[in-house]
Image (tube, rainbow, N blue to C red):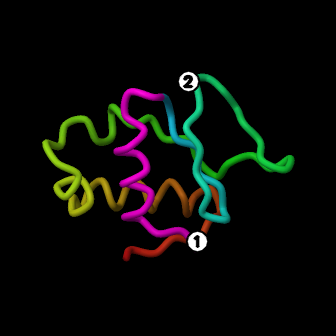
């Protein structure tokens, strides 16, 4: 099961390094923009672009507790067929 706060922290940490790919098993990887990675032949559930999602927040704590961002991450994962819970 994926956890919303962990994904937002990983997105926060990926700022300036690339996009964040998220797999159903909870693993993440920073990837180059436009890259379509596979892990053991499996594509990620979602690829998030960090700057548009979290760059407007002055601190990670604000991003982790923003209801709109939480909902956006959870909706993206669920629509891709993943299980996610708010921790």
Q: Is 14 colored magenta in this rendering? A: yes
For the residue labelled by badge 1, is the local secondary structure a helix, a strand or a loop?
Answer: loop
Above or below — where is 25 with respect to 47? below
Across and down, in percent, residue 3 comes to 46, 69
Give the side of residue 77 with respect to residue 57, left or right: right
Residue 44 to residue 67: above or below: above
Classify residue 67 by image quadrant.
Answer: bottom left
Mark 1 is surrounded, within 10 Å at the Cα level, by few (under 14), some (14 to 19) or many (20 or more) other residues, namely some
Q: Residue at x 37, y 54 (%)?
A: 8
Residue depicted at x 66% and y 62%:
24
Q: Quadrant of the C terminus?
A: bottom left
Label 2 secondary element: loop
Magenta residues, start to end: 1-17
- Secondary structure character of the magenta stretch overall: helix
User: Which residue was labeled with disc 1?
Assistant: 83
Which residue, as the protein is rendered here, is positioned at the far right? 41
Q: How many marks?
A: 2
Side of 77 where 44 appears, left or right = right
Asked whether 32 falls inside the magenta stretch, the response is: no
Q: Where residue 34 appears, x then y in whole percent? A: 61, 23
Residue 33: mark: 2
**N-terminal-most mark, 1 or 2:** 2
């Amino acid at each position: 099961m994926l956890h919303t706060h962990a994904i937002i922290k990983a997105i926060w940490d990926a700022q300036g390094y690339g996009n964040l790919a998220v797999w159903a098993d909870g693993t993440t990887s920073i990837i180059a923009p436009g890259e379509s990675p596979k892990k053991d032949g499996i594509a990620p559930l979602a690829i998030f672009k960090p700057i548009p999602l979290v760059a407007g927040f002055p601190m990670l704590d604000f991003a982790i507790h923003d209801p709109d961002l939480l909902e956006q991450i959870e909706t993206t994962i669920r629509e891709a067929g993943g299980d996610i819970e708010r921790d």
